[in-house]
Image (cartoon, rainbow, N blue to C red):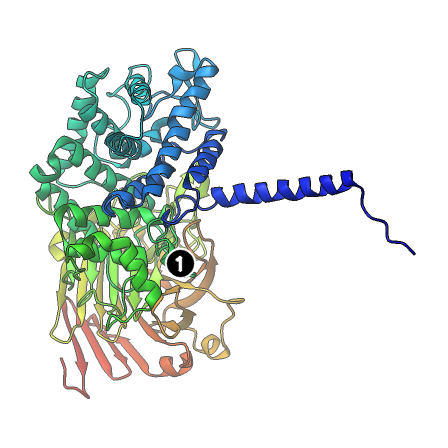
Amino acid sequence: MHRAFPTFSVIAAFFSVICGLSHAEKNDDLLAGHPRPSYEGVEDIDAMAAALRSSLGKQERYSFSRSWWQWDRLRCRYVDGGRKDKGALKILHAAFSALILDWHARLKAKGEGDLLYLYYTSLSGDSKESRLDAGGRELLRDLHGGGYHGGWGGGARMRIYLELAAQGVLTKKEKARFGEIVRQSMEARFIDFTQKAQSANNHSYGNAGGIALALKHFPGLPQEKQARAWINRIWASLADFGDWKEWNYYPYGPIFLHGMIDIAESTGRIESESALINAVARRCLGFVHGGGVRGNPNSGAPTREELAGLYADPWNLGYYQVEQPARDGHFWYRMAKHYRDPQYLWAAEQVILGGRPAGGKVPQGYLKAYRKRFDWFIERGIEPKEPAGGAAIGLLSAGKEKIPERLYLNAGRSPGDPIAAFFLYPKKDEHLDNVSGHLYEYCFGGAKLLHCSGKYNNVYSGDTLRGGGTGEESLDLLLVIHKRHPFPLHPDRRGDERDFMRSGSITPLPGLLIAENNDARDSFGQFAFNNYYGEGSRWIRRVVLTAEGALVVADEYVGGKALGEQYRAGPLWHVAVEGEQKLTEAQEASGNWFDAPAFDHAWWSESESRLLVVFCDDGKSDFGTLPQKHSQDTRPNRLVFASRAIAGGRPERFLSVLVPHPAGVPAERVAGGIACKVSDAGVFSADIGGVEVEIKGSKWSVQRAARGIK
């Protein structure tokens, strides 16, 4: 038998397919992973830049607001690296050319070149379809510009242009065309500077950075006078109050904070207004600690499970899995660089890489990532420095209004230290609803034991709840609801006038605020609200955080007369879930304690931790547990609670004891070592394995007989 050989035409076709596949694979390789951790050593950087430019320029749409942040970090990496990575400059040129110059040329060919705008627009239109009316002509968001949020990328676009121009890689004609686009972007047909945000928030500050740079480098722009007046107005809003009010730190905080630096750099305020800028940054610095895990007032921040990618590219990734994870760390990077401040550098390391464990020993991957990300500081001998800790009242507008915003309980911010924090500010904004008084963070030993239950809880769209919770039971606080509702399922507050509301009604009592430590590194905090679920009602919460990490929470509530005898009250805690969330036989028998895994662990944590929640059993309370929905930025949780019938005018007291323990120690054994009591005189006491805690009014003590510490 003779084997048949292929004809020449078949061979030619075969090699044609192979060559085609090789070309496609080669092109895919050129386009993968931009911006890359490094462009040094790329064999054919010109081919890579050309492929990237072609690919980006052929997109139908892209985000004018957020997508430019990554390219701006590449610019920063190139500049701070001494401008040695020439390949990075070519890639920046490719991205800029594709997304602005080529984009403009493509629109111009369709007769729409004059509709491209680089900053933001105050025009309104069909938000669902992202269509805006520009004098009878249709603007499409992410095609002609980024809509109202489009200016969020404006500062990045301007900085990249200025670097490319300074390095001589743009032709005279290209610079002239960019100037043309800048000028048309500032025209009144796009922006009315008296409309939209006129105060300090993420909208105005995110949009203002690019405009401030345009005014600095392109004199004689349309509406120059109006634009400067707008920037001065929004800066005066910040300066007059001495702060800004953006409670949901992720993702909106860094948008404002970068905008603050952008405006300050462009207008000469970075030094002249340094006291104000640093006051804002110092408040935000209070949110950061070395625990390797994090909670926020109204958003979750789980840690990254896979670290190899982070270590390979610390400029574009971050330790926390949040929207734009590298954005927060880069704010701290910029602040540390401007002011040569080692505490800001410490904060940058915490949010980018997760921070170091006690003793400072880290793997080689971590060290290499640190050198890659912070080489600018290493060359100048600037090392991270941990800020001082200690129990404190965090103040909003600390230099002027001195408004209590948060209660911090800790003895330090070192890795492994116990930390708890409560949010106090009573006025909601559109991104943070009704969270006043709730515990938003509780960490110990590299474990996140409790945190908030998610973004946009108790926020309605019509009569339907958005986000993760089903009402005010979505928060870790004291709940009061009418008996006709099964506790703690809160009703739809719309159209239900018989149930009293917290939001918009409660009054904080700053004179009752306390935050202090003893010599044994225990912490104590106290806060209170009047008109808490009904006029004349008062809630006082007193908390001891022991050096061992236990949290003892004493709640005292006196309902107003209007509550009568128709209400129930009790504390709520949201714990993490596992498996089918079944209770153990011992737990079902005892009823008043619940055990759960930690929500999260630091990368350096060597063992799993759990949390035991014990409600002091007074013989009058009921105890229960309930699965909760969760929103897009948190993990599932289970609500555990205690409640009892209350009467207006009668003091009610509840005691919760929260104890972290190693996963290998049975919960029954931990629970068996806890005894607690609330006396008729209002003294709260708990014995936690020989650590005795007592709270009597605003007086407190922690005693350890074995060590004689008080």
Question: Looking at this view, is 27 or 655 the one in front?
Answer: 27
Residue farthest toward the top in the current orientation of the protein: 136
Dividing the picture into quadrants, the one containing residue 400 is top left
Q: Residue at x 43, y 28 (%)?
A: 142
Question: Looking at this view, is 490 or 90 the one in front?
Answer: 90
Quadrant of image for the C terminus: bottom left
Residue 556 screen position, x and y as percent: 24, 62
Judge left or right: residue 427 versus residue 181: left
Q: Which residue is mark 1?
A: 304
Mark 1 secondary-structure assignment: loop
379 to 500, vertically: above or below: below
152 to 1, vertically: above or below: above
Judge left or right: residue 136 versus residue 352: right
Residue farthest toward the right in the current orientation of the protein: 1
Quadrant of image for the N terminus: bottom right
The three-letter code of the residue at mark 1 reads Arg
Dividing the picture into quadrants, the one containing residue 226 is top left
486 to 268, vertically: above or below: below
Residue 392 screen position, x and y as percent: 15, 59
Residue 415 screen position, x and y as percent: 25, 68
Dividing the picture into quadrants, the one containing residue 90 is top left
